[in-house]
Image (cartoon, grey):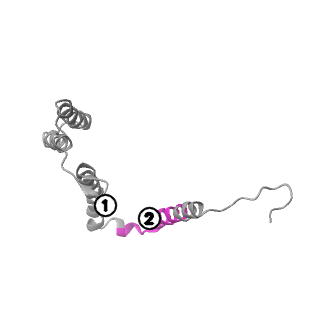
Amino acid sequence: MAAPGVAAVAVTGTWIAVLVTAGGCYALKLAGLAVPARWLDHPRAQRFAALVPVALLAGLVAVQATARGRALTADPAVLAGLGAAVAALLLRAPFLIVIVAAAGTAAGLRALGAG
């Protein structure tokens, strides 16, 4: 029971999940700061730190380009846009040009009725 003049606040499962997640994020950040410098200077750790973001981003792109909900799809416009982005990256184009090439290719194909 709340004290007189104080409104009772219901703690829901959502708020508990938010607070637990925030605590977990803080603990993970603290653990990262507590790692000894000699571990971080190891060549294997540096290679891992350099390659993990690339692998995660590649996986995200693959899933977003080929999945709709729980189904795999082959949208020709999206796949062509992804191909255009890969080609622009291989030509070492600036990131903005890569995005414009991918979006322009996908939009152009959609305007022509593909996808």
Where in the figure is residue 62, as x and y percent of width and height? 23, 53
Identify the residue at image location x=29%, y=54%. Answer: 60
Which circle's residue, 1 or 2, is located before the other in the chain?
2
Q: Secondary structure at mark 2?
A: helix
Q: Quadrant of residue 105?
A: top left
**From the viewer's perspective, is 91 left or right of 99?**
left
Specify the amino acid type for callout 2: Gly
Farthest residue, direction right: 4
User: What is the magenta segment's predominant secondary structure?
Assistant: helix
Tell me residue 42's x, y (percent). Answer: 30, 67
Q: Residue at x 26, y 62 (%)?
A: 47
**Which quadrant holds residue 17?**
bottom right
Q: Is residue 37 magenta?
A: yes
Amino acid found under the numbered disc labelled 1: Ala
**Mark number for residue 49?**
1
> What residue is pinned by disc 2?
32
- Which class describes the residues within 10 Å of circle 1: few (<14), some (14-19), or many (20+)? few
Q: Is residue 57 left or right of residue 22?
A: left
| Magenta region includes residue 83 | no
The region drawn magenta spans 22-39
